[in-house]
Image (cartoon, grey):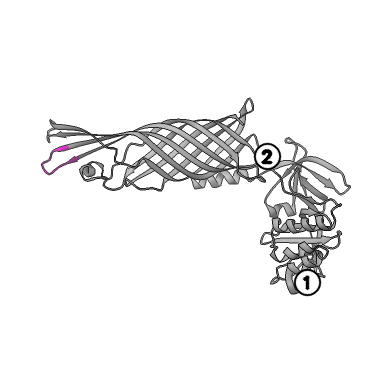
Amino acid sequence: MLLLMVGFAKIAAESNFRPGYIINNADDVIHGLIDYQETKANARLCLFKKNERSAVQPFSPTEIKAYRINDSKYYISQVLNMGSTTDTLFLEYLIQGKVNIYYYFDGQKPHYLVNKDYNELEELIDSQEEGTISEHSNRMDYSGYHGTLKFLFLESNYALEIVDGVVLSHASLINITKIYNQEVYPDDVCTVYGIKVVPETLKYGLLVGYNLNSFIVLDKISDNLAKYLQNARYDTKLYPSIGIFIKKNASSTNDRVYLQYEGTYSYEKLQNRDTYLNKFNLIYDNDVTLTRNVFNNTLNFRYEFPKKKIQPTLHAGIFANCSFNNSFEHHLDVRQPNGEPAYGDKDFYKYPYSNLDYGINLGVGIIGKVFNGREYFLDLRYQNRMEYKGKVDIDYLMLNLGVVIGE
């Protein structure tokens, strides 16, 4: 299951084209699709195509001035002084105003840069690190990036009060820069890029599927049942299930993460048969039949990969399965060594196992709008029981098909 999940992630990460635009060196704005990759790749290369059927065009930071993913991240080309050398990169524009903050990742660590009134870029450096960007950065080295920020935010009393609590992160730097820009220059436009507010969504629908259960007795259940249940392995069978689901986005800034509840019902009939000889060479045929009505409750975080017609998904969460109206039947046939019946016995016992199973589940799947624009998903999920009251081990492998019927 883990290898399958890794394979899904690798396939989905190959391309991630989203609507956006590029600004070429002639200041022309060209709209199309941009491949959004991991942070290091975004700083070195922009992959662009005009539409889904067009060929991919690669652009380096020297070939275009900027690119942006609609309502999301914005990258601009900048020449950076690296001591005795220079390098041209796409910097992520975090906030634009009187003071501007930029970001890039070099594959080893993150870098945050700042300028005021669009003057020379200066890197915000931890007090124990050496600067690499601006020849003027030595003026504040005695107190690291906090000193740099205090120098930039001298006109804002409130910014100076909170600057010592600032850390090198997107949220922290955007917050204090926004405070400064709005306090000192309230009439100027201050734009925060890369923060996309995802509207709250709630979807619900129906589920049908099959459950494959592995039910193994690990130890004695009770004295009178011990010889019948010790190390029993019930038949592994497929059981149909039906239920409902409710799905809600789990983040206001990420449209790929969802929280999903599923409740499904299944009826299970499990059987175990053992044959053994006693000391008198009598043959014992030991049949155990277990019936369960199971309501399976799962709560998962789902990650849906970039929007395509069919999207891979990964999910992980917890489950709690409740069983009810259960029965336990034991049938014993004893035969002579020649096979002739000796005697038989049939008993009904109180259900010897726990009525509650809970644990963790992991899964993969696909999702897409395939029929009349309605959303369908197909999930394969593994559930591992973490609770051992009743001294049994139960594993569930579930295949569910879901369809959204309302939102």
Seen as rendered, the residue at the extreme left is 280
Q: Amino acid at mark 1?
A: Met
Judging depth in this view, the residue of 343 and 189 nearest the camera is 189
Kindly give the residue lying farthest to the bottom in the view shown: 142
Where is residue 351? Give x, y as percent. Answer: 29, 38
x%, y% of residue 153?
80, 64
| First of labels 1, 2 by sequence position | 1
User: Which dot marks residue 199?
Assistant: 2
Residue 339: horizontal and vertical position, in percent?
Answer: 14, 32
Relative depth, front residue between 50 and 238: 238
Position of 80 compared to 227: left or right? right
Q: Residue at x 74, y 65 (%)?
A: 161
Image quadrant in which you'd find residue 341: top left
Secondary structure beneath dot 1 equals: helix
The image shows residue 301 at horizontal and vertical percentages of 55, 44
Residue 390 visible at all? yes
Label 1 vs label 2, nearer the camera: 2
Q: Amino acid at mark 2?
A: Pro
User: Which mark identifies residue 140?
Assistant: 1
Q: Is residue 217 above or below residue 158?
A: above
98 in relation to 8, above or below: below
Residue drawn 14% across the image and 42% down it? 278
Quarter-of-image position of residue 71: top right
Q: Which residues are magenta?
A: 276-283
